[in-house]
Image: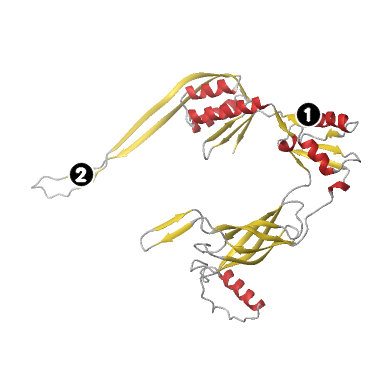
Amino acid sequence: MRNLMAVLLWLGLAVSAGGTERLKDITAVQGLRDNQLVGYGLVLGLSGTGDSLRNAPFTEQSMRSMLQRMGVGVEAGTLRSRNVAAVVVTATLPPFVAQGSRIDVTVSSMGDASSLAGGMLAMTPLMAADGEAYVVAQGPVMVTGFSAAGQAEAVTQGVPTAGRIPNGGLVEKDNTADMNGTRTLALQLHNADFKTAVTVADVINAHARRAYGGPIAEAHDFRSVVIKRPERVSASRLLAELGELEVEVDGSARVVVDERTGTIVIGDRVRVKPVAVTQGSITVRVTETPQASQPNPLADGETVMLPETDVGVAQTGGHVAMLQGPTIDELVRGLNQMGLKPPGIIAILQAIKTAGALQGELVVQ
């Protein structure tokens, strides 16, 4: 735990000492986003590791439908193959992808198939939220995990029921647009902050006065900065020039804790007012040690078990410590000196926030 807190401290100081960041690293152009695609298909050619048609009836229905489209009539309940698996195919369509481009797709099993290794995805259309098919996926599935089983033991490494098809998706519908016809652009901050938005606008305007003769940016709110594109400059060139500008980023004072994994991340701007903290734990141990009671040899009796319970209470910790953390360095040092584990630190941080001594936002996941 001490090493972890030291690493977090080093990261916080490193970010603070970094100073500035490139504009392209802290913003994104509004409207230029990825689109998620999804489709349903069949993986063929499995070596007996596909779906059992009795437990996955949708696989049999899909096989019959595919064969009927190819002119092969199959009666219901006559298919017994375990070389086919029903899968969900997903992909991410980047912006400005033209027809004929290729993207990677991910294949995940829907039924009770044990492995997709060696399988071939049949032609599967991938649709967006508007119901239109933008990509058609097909190709051999690459699986990194494996599964082997015998009569008394089974070994599984990784996830053999999911895989990828590199360049397996063929774009059938253009996702391009003409940015140069847009006079107004908007940059969205990855981490919303009023001061950072104003700083971004000031840096852009300082560059625009030198390059274009006047200001072009205005902070719209704490998340977006609106830019008016000069007529003689294309949108691509303008964004390329602005993306290299250095901007001083102002972070927020925030503590993020994850109670499930015991992860604690403390920002370098977090401050703690002087506060006295005591932390201890009570352990109650109940032990059952039944004793056998036997009758005398000449007595006509029976052996019985008599219950015997031992209850012990132990309390550890309970010492009082002063936390004076005007900086993250002193805060981490004080928490380490108390010898606490992550659950104890999380409880203390929540109590300090309730007491009003934590100058920052506490996010509990």
Quarter location, residue 172: bottom right
Q: Which residue is mark 2?
A: 292
Tell whether 102 sits left or right of 47: right
In the image, what residue type sits under mark 2?
Answer: Ala
Where is residue 168 drawn, in percent x and y? 64, 60
- Which quarter of the figure is the C terminus placed in? top right
Quarter location, residue 136: bottom right
Instruction: Report the residue that reaches farthest toward the left.
Output: 298
| Residue 98 against residue 199 in the figure, above or below | below
Q: How many residues crowd around disc 1 within 10 Å: few (fewer than 14), some, or many (20 or more)?
A: some
Q: Earlier in the sequence, mark 1 or mark 2?
A: 1
> At numbered mark 1, what does the secondary structure look like: helix, strand or loop?
helix
Residue located 82% across and 32% down the image: 204
> At numbered mark 2, what does the secondary structure look like: helix, strand or loop?
strand
Tell whether 165 sits left or right of 305: right
Tell whether 258 sits left or right of 294: right
Quarter location, residue 21: top right
The foreground one among 16 and 285 is 16
- Is disc 1 in contact with disc 2, using a CB cutoff of under 8 Å? no
In the image, what residue type sits under mark 1?
Answer: Thr
Residue located 27% across and 39% down the image: 308
Residue located 87% across and 34% down the image: 216
Q: Which residue is mark 1?
A: 199
Tell whether 357 sits left or right of 31: left
Q: Which mark is residue 16?
A: none
Spatial CA span between label 1 and label 2: 80 Å
| Residue 92 against residue 58 in the figure, above or below | above
Q: Nearer the viewer, mark 1 or mark 2?
A: 1
